[in-house]
Image: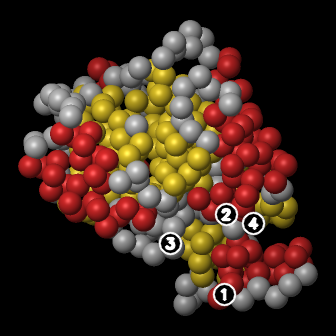
Amino acid sequence: MYFRTLDDFKNYISGSDFSSSEQLMIMAGDRSAGHIPEMIELLNERNISFFGAIFPEIIIGNKTRREGFVVEKLRPVYSALVFPYMMKFSQSEGKLRGATAIIFADGLSGRMKDLTDTVYDKLGDTVTYVGGGAGFKDMKHRPCIFNSTGLHKDALYVCIIKNKTSLAVEHGWKIMRGPFYVNRAYDNVLSVIDNCNAFDVYRHVIEEEENLTLFKEDFFIYAKDHPFGILDKDGTIIVRDPVAVNDADEIICVAGIPEGSDLYILHGDIEALLKSSLQVTRAHENINNPPKRYLPLLFDCISRAMFLGKYISEELDNIQANLTYGVEGALSIGEIACKKTGELVIHNKSTVLALMEL
């Protein structure tokens, strides 16, 4: 459900009944962030359980909006606000096998991987993970995760529901240079590759390929077109988004890059990325016993949308046209999914589509 204004949301609340077993999942566009404190107060007054996050843009069908709220009513078997290495969980993992863990994380937190590791250390591969990194389109780090206790940053919210989910991930980016060896990285910062300063190596490659001079001040203009690719142990490439350069000439990324990994510099074109948006829906065609009713949850990267420009509408058209039900989701700062092995992974510049059985 989409509500353009807070008043529309209030009308929904006043005209609906809620049980103690239900919880509202709320995705807010960043231009509606100023209404969140009033929303929290309203829901607390009515004893309605809820959690949510502020995203650069929210997705409704084949459209994106920076204002308004996407709202769904869930029946969780477990939900919690999580901080790095702080998560209370005492349930049997076996009872959750096959369930879905919806995750909203602070996408600009330097400890995003610590947050997801905290969840994975508790839940393991028993659940299907899907979600996205929250935050604001201007990429300034502010509180963006909320529940009854208020707005939080450097935090994550996890909500586990019994519903089964089919999951697909695609990105469409291609290798341009590499591999480079990651000598030093910490938190979400890439420091040294091939025994050289990370920014010096990256700048040299971009200047050669693009025939330009790359300065720190205009880093993101070109970096959004040339993300990193981490070679995973299964041979696939996990995309990592460079967003800024710090005072030590280290590259700040959305989520971390493991030390000792092989790293590539990637490039893409509109055609390849749009092709991958067709593949993400086709990946669901081969599942056994597809659900008759489902909620399509989509997390598509905000910097991918910036790269695509006006063609982001075509990407969303490609996805919605191949689904029976209306898509809901967000343009996110990092996309959260799991491998076939169940391992939780943070993606960037990628498209994560979950078909959640209803």
Q: Give x and y (percent) for residue 303.
A: 63, 62
- Mark nearest the camera among 2 and 3 is 2
Q: Are marks 3 and 4 in contact (CB under 8 Å)?
A: no
User: Are the two marked residues, 2 and 3, in contact with CB atoms closer than 8 angstroms?
Assistant: no
Comparing 200 with 48, the one in front is 48
The residue at the point 73 percent across, 84 percent down is 200
Report the disc number at residue 225: 4
Under circle 1, the secondary element is helix
- Tell me, what colour scheme is on the image? secondary structure
Identify the residue at image location x=27%, y=30%: 76
Between residues 13 and 163, which one lies in front from this camera angle? 13
Give the distance between the C-alpha atoms of the residues marked 2 and 4, in whole angstroms. 9 Å
Would you name the residue on which mark 1 appears? 216
Residue 260 visible in this rendered orientation of the protein = no
Q: Please give the residue where the numbered disc 2 appears in the rendered image.
A: 306
Instruction: Name the image quarter holding residue 74.
Output: top left
| Label 1: how many Cα within 10 Å (few below 14, some 14–19, many 20+) | some
Q: Secondary structure at mark 2?
A: helix
The amino acid marked with disc number 2 is Met
Sequence order check, earlier mark of 2 and 3:
3
Q: Nearer the viewer, mark 2 or mark 4?
A: 2
